Amino acid sequence: MEPLSSFFAVSVILLGIGIYGLTTKRNAIRILFSVELIYNAANLNIIAFARLRNPPIVTGQVLVLFTIALAAMEAAVGLSIIILVSRLNAEIDLSKLSKLKG
Amino acid sequence: MTDLLFLAFAAVTIGAAILAIEARDLVYGAAALGIAFLGVAGLFFLLDAAYVGWFQIAVYIGAVVVLILFTVMLVGPKMGETPLGLKRVSLLAAILVSLLLGMTGALANATAFPGQDSCGSGCDLTLLSTSLLKNYGVQLEFMSLVMAAAVIGALAISKTDRGQ
């Protein structure tokens, strides 16, 4: 098998791409893409770390099943919010949505 | 063989993730995101977590990407295309993120990660299901409650009439 550190490397690169997208993009849907990428980086990390123990344990896989389900719910709620905002404002550019600004 | 598979999956995942963030068209971005999810599922298979891999394919590609595509079509693929004149901010973000990655990589490289070659009981499907239903049964029930709340909340949010 490939050494575990290469899986960690892929995970860290995914996290970096996600953070880059979060900081530079203004489109709400693209920010959701970045959040999903960060979720995937975390899941990959958990699965790889579950292999680190001797003997390996199944708890890591159980945890990742839970996070995948949670990420799907988060995407559903986030996308419905995006649809509502686009209907109210004809705009999903987050830098132009300042209605809640005090 | 595993090395080649790993390299292929890693390259597909990272390339598709970059494309998902940087593609001009949101539809292409969503498709690239689906390919990145497929690559992560392949990495799960390489880590002997086959059930999680199939779960990832079913939930992410079957549900999340389809939902995103629906939203892109409802909202309009051209919307939110900010031509942001933030080239300098992008460059700064790229530099900072690569610094962070380099530091993390150096730290990880200094540590030995002795992975077990055979997964054994850690990847047993029977053990996984037993653990899921016996040790984490309460959490599973809470998860379904949260799922019901999320679905009802999403329906309530998107049903609101315009201008109210």
Image: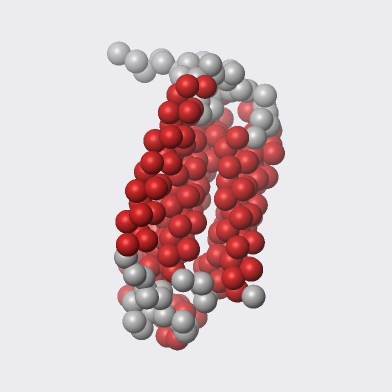
Q: Please, which colouring scheme is shown?
A: secondary structure
- Give me the residue at 36% from left, 70% from top: B113
**Percent of width and height locating residue A76:** 52, 43
Indicate the quadrant where residue B135 lies: bottom left
The quarter of the rendered structure image containing the N terminus of chain B is bottom right
- A78 displayed left or right of B58: left
Q: Nearer the viewer, residue B86 or B58?
A: B86
Residue for point 69% across, 37% down: B27
Pinpoint residue B72: horizontal percent, then vertical percent. Answer: 64, 34
Choose between B157 and A20: the one closer to the eye.
Answer: A20
Q: Is residue A25 above or below residue B104?
A: above
Q: Position of residue A52 (x, y in %)?
A: 37, 73
**Is B109 rendered above or below residue B31?**
below
Residue at horizontal 32 percent and vertical 62 percent from the top: B110
Q: Nearer the viewer, residue B147 or B106?
A: B106
Residue B119 at x, y percent in the picture: 45, 82
Residue occupying image coordinates x 37% and y 75%: B114
The image quarter containing residue B82 is: top right
